[in-house]
Image (cartoon, rainbow, N blue to C red):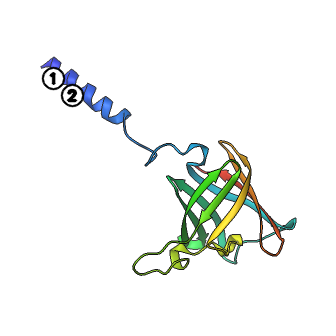
Amino acid sequence: MKRLAYITALLAALAATSSCTQNNGHIGPLFGSWSLQSMTVDDADMPLPPGVIGTTMSFQSDVVRFNLIYQYSHTFESFATWSKTGDVMVFDFAHHDDVTAEGTGMYAPPSWLGFEALQETVTVTELDGKHFDFVRTDDEGHKYIYKFDRTW
């Protein structure tokens, strides 16, 4: 009887410690959620839309979710895939489903971040366990600087 209890406890411990927290493998320091702390365009602060209390980016596997958070728990989500080579990161919004056309609805680039193209390329300037900063220049030559802090 003691042996059965020991085996059961061992199996339970193994199951608890072998669960996966990062679907499709470890993606490094990007995994998790990041909250926008500041955004500037040509060195001028760029405010979020009226009624918005924050925005986040969350990474898992090759998918990123941009989340615009309004007062009273209303949110707007935008999804993309991403790739990163060195310090260059590309967000790809060229996706669709049976109902939503490519680059619209939940696949639309997050306009509140100044993203408009189906593929946006940024240069990562800082990425560690606490901070994720990147810059990009739009087609008109405006320089955007984004600073995010990890939420989880």
Task: Name which residue lies at 57% across and 43% down.
Answer: 28
For residue 60, side relative to residue 83 (left or right):
left
Residue 89: x and y in percent read: 66, 56
Find residue 139 and report its image quarter.
bottom right
Q: Residue at x 50, y 72 (%)?
A: 95
Q: Position of residue 80 (x, y in %)?
A: 55, 65
Amino acid on which disc 1 is placed: Leu
Give the amino acid at mark 2. Thr
Residue corresponding to mark 2: 8
Front-lying residue, 75 or 42: 42
Quadrant housing the N terminus: top left
Q: Nearer the viewer, residue 23 or 52?
A: 23
What x and y, as percent, mark residue 22?
Answer: 46, 46
Q: Check the image and name the residue furthest to the top.
A: 2
Few, some or many C-alpha atoms within 10 Å of disc 1 (few <14, some 14-19, many ≥20)? few
In percent of the image, x 56 and y 57: which residue is there? 58
Q: Measure the C-alpha gap from mark 2 to mark 1.
A: 6 Å
Disc 1 on helix, strand or loop? helix
Q: Is residue 118 above or below residue 19?
A: below
- Give the secondary structure at mark 2: helix
Residue 4: mark: 1
Answer whether labels 2 and 1 touch (C-beta < 8 Å).
Answer: yes
Please tell me whether residue 140 is drawn above or below residue 21 in the rendered image: below
